[in-house]
Amino acid sequence: MVGSPVVSDFLRRLRGRPALVMTALLVLLAAWEIGQLAYVHAAAPGDSDWKAATALIRAELRPGQDLIVFAPDWVDPLGRKWLGDELTLDDLGRMDAARYARIWEVTVRGAEPPETEHLGAPTYTVHFGGVRVRRFEQKPAVVTWAPQQGQEIQEVAHAPRRCVRGTGRHDYHAVSLGSTLQVYAGLADVWARKENRAFARVRVLVDGQEVGATSVGNDDGWKRLAPIATTPGLHEVSFDVALDPERGDPRRARLDVCLAAEARTP
Amino acid sequence: MRQRMDRWIAVAIFAFVSLVTLAASPLQGVHRDEAVYMEASERYVAYVERLLRGQQPHPFSAAAVDPYFSCGAGCNSEHPPLMKLLFGVSWRLFADVDASKQNLHPGGFARVAGGQRSLALLPESTAFRLPTILLFGLLAALVYLFFIDALADRSPTDRDTPTTAGRVGALAAALLTAAQPRAFFHAQTAAFDLPAAFFWFVCMTAYWRALLPARPLRAALKLGLLYGLFLATKLQSFFLPVALGAHYVWLRWRYARVRSRADAGDAAALAAVPPSPPGPWPLVAVALVSPLVLFVLWPYLWHQPIAHFKTYWAFHANHVHYNFEYLGVNYNHPPFPWHEPFGMLITTAPVVLLVLAAAGIGLLTSDAWRARIGPPLAEKRSTRFLLLVCALVPLLPFLTGQAPIFGETKHWLASMPILALCAGFAVQALGRGLISELALGEPARRGLRAAVLTGLVFVSAAPAVAETVRSHPYGLSHYNALAGGAPGGADLGMNRQFWGYSVRGLLEWFNRTLPRGSVIYPHDWSEGAFNVDLRDHLLRDDLRYAARELPGMRCSNVALVVHELHFNKYDYMIWNTYGHAQPTRVLTLDGVPLVSVYVRKDPMPAGCGR
């Protein structure tokens, strides 16, 4: 086509006519810009897309075993508008998604949430207009203990977390541990982080022995500690949370430490 | 240099842009700061009215002035008064004020109290906004005229007449000034950001005119008066002398260089050197006249002027750092990324404006091109350098990463008309080229020439108009086609909005749906904006405004979250309080959530007064 006489003739005519070429490019740019805006508007999922996705999930959802996640993060309010009644506050403030057998991923614009990115291929995928529904399955962890149960949901790294709050020592007696203790920690409250320039040191103790530790600051988000191998049975568990004197500016500390843990049997 | 035709075109641009903006304004919500300025405006105009009616026994005394201009938050003495005075006058003349809603006005200042009448032509919020709207129209018209004077090609037979291509470039520049989503948003507010951009441009052009005037002192005095009005508008005015000063130093340096070459016998330099260096009068007027204008216009400075000026300055020097999401990170304290102004520019301005402006900058700075087309008419005044410094200086504070107020495009809105001028320069070059290449200069092809050049203006402005139309009335949430629109902006992790104005899009739903006497936890929707919506009959009278933060949330049965990254916390507070996480309604722009509305499912706790 490029070498055809018609095209060659056309290109020869354009040569020496820079204004005409530039105007043609401007017309293309204008068409692209207007077309792109129209496409973005048309591609936004409508109520019918969300309704269809919702109907599918509701029909197959197994309450207590299934988790619904939305991506990208910014679409979360819309997802909760349609499916929020299928999510408990425990689901929303979860430490992570290890305890769920099935994860329903509801996304727009091809986003992939962190909860499913390591799970391999979905068991199925369905598109409803701009909404994609995928289901993933995994072997759920059995949780034998979680100290954050019943606590209020806090904001850590702009995401919801149920957690135990505050500096000092948090002691738990006769805790039923499984084979792993998984701990997360972060700094809650965007206003506190705005003023804070310090770090918190978090130590995990089982039967008085330190088994894990980390330091968390404003930019650490929801920090996952390395899984701690534990002996199943009843134990004393403590979390020791204090100002980290070696990092940041301890004089400008406003630490609202938020931590969560799950004793698990994989 | 201007023809009568150009003046008429400028008038038409002013009328068109003003009317379109006026028509669009009622759909855009009142933002948090606007509500504060509206309240102050009522106070200011009450003072002026009592002064004019002779109702103030000692009108210039502290006792007479302070209740209106120095009374804490309600007087808004952290910002200069000019626009608030104009908002107040416009409101007093044109607002349709409901006498039954006296209690929603700042205490004792509702003009309807004494049976005084206005023309009742506009809703109150629109009447407050009218001065900004008119300045926006005026800005577009002045961009057209400045282009004609400074950048337009001239007819070879009559140096006073711009060519058709010149007019096409000027028209494109004017349209691209108005068709910018963020500028269009700010043009519909009773706030100072668009007026600051207007005065920046007006002062720049007045300075430019003062450099080669027939009567230099008169021109300088005019600049001093205009800059005084700018000082009385917003703090950005303090940066303008930096730009003008840099340009003046450049002019002196350039003069000294040519003079020395002329003295050395360079014939070309001898022919080009002006008889004297540019006079300092424009800058002298800026230094001496304008502070007087500020003082006269601002009664807050009439008593304890130094202490009050220090208070004004300190408010901004120590301004709180706002939260602002940029590329997925919530920034609320320094250091901020230096490139944020550029990141916001390339994701919010119409792409066609960016491309044409880049081409125009290339043409304006290319020596080769200049040699080909001849220097612009106004080159003796180093117009290009003036445009460069005046476009860059508004951005400079934000490139340091330490500016107290970090974030949106509004603080360097003054750069945008200059970008539009550059874009117009590129359109002019295209028009000139098309006329030449298609042989449209022949009289017999006049019709075809008109059609081609009209089409050129259309393709130059239509995408920008489409971006602006698409953004309305949520201009602060709009991202351009390059970013992928609002969803693309959200994917990039760009600021969703601020000022809580987008709740306006829910008012009809509130009126239709909420039970009588509902108490609304407002989140970022200010009480002042809520009251203005009540006064404008946009909201049912029985709806109530809850207190702020957790106490208000607990004693509400409807709760809002205006979505910005750092406001996610309020979602979770509502979940804890209401016991569920399912919004009843989510206001969106192209699928991107702007505001969530939660409805309480159980009764309000005991102790919450109704």
Image (spheres, coloured by chain):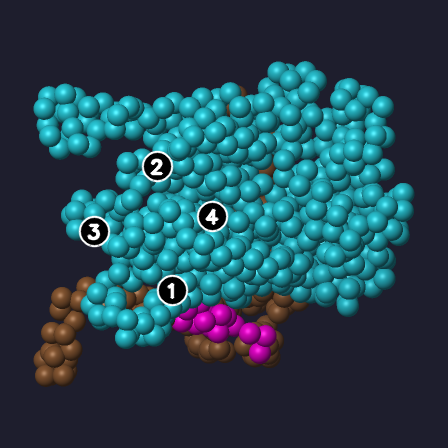
Chain colours: A brown, B cyan
Instruction: Return the residue at label 3.
Output: B373
Circle 4/circle 3 CB separation < 8 Å: no
For the residues labelled 3 and 2, the Cα–Cα distance comes to 20 Å
Instruction: Return the residue at label 1.
Output: B457
Chain letter for mark 1 = B
Q: Residue B142: which disc?
A: 4
Q: Is residue B185 visible?
A: yes
Residue type at numbered disc 1: Val
For the residues labelled 4 and 1, the Cα–Cα distance comes to 18 Å
Chain letter for mark 4 = B
Q: Which residues are magenta?
A: A34-48
Residue at left offset 25%, top offset 70%: B442
Residue at left offset 46%, top offset 31%: B219
> Within 10 angstroms of label 1, few (less than 14), some, or many (20 or more) residues?
many
For the residues labelled 4 and 3, the Cα–Cα distance comes to 25 Å
Badge nearest the viewer, 1 or 3: 3
Badge nearest the viewer, 4 or 2: 4
Give the camera-side residue of B64 and A61: B64
Q: Is residue A43 magenta?
A: yes
Instruction: Return the residue at label 2.
Output: B386
Residue type at numbered disc 2: Leu
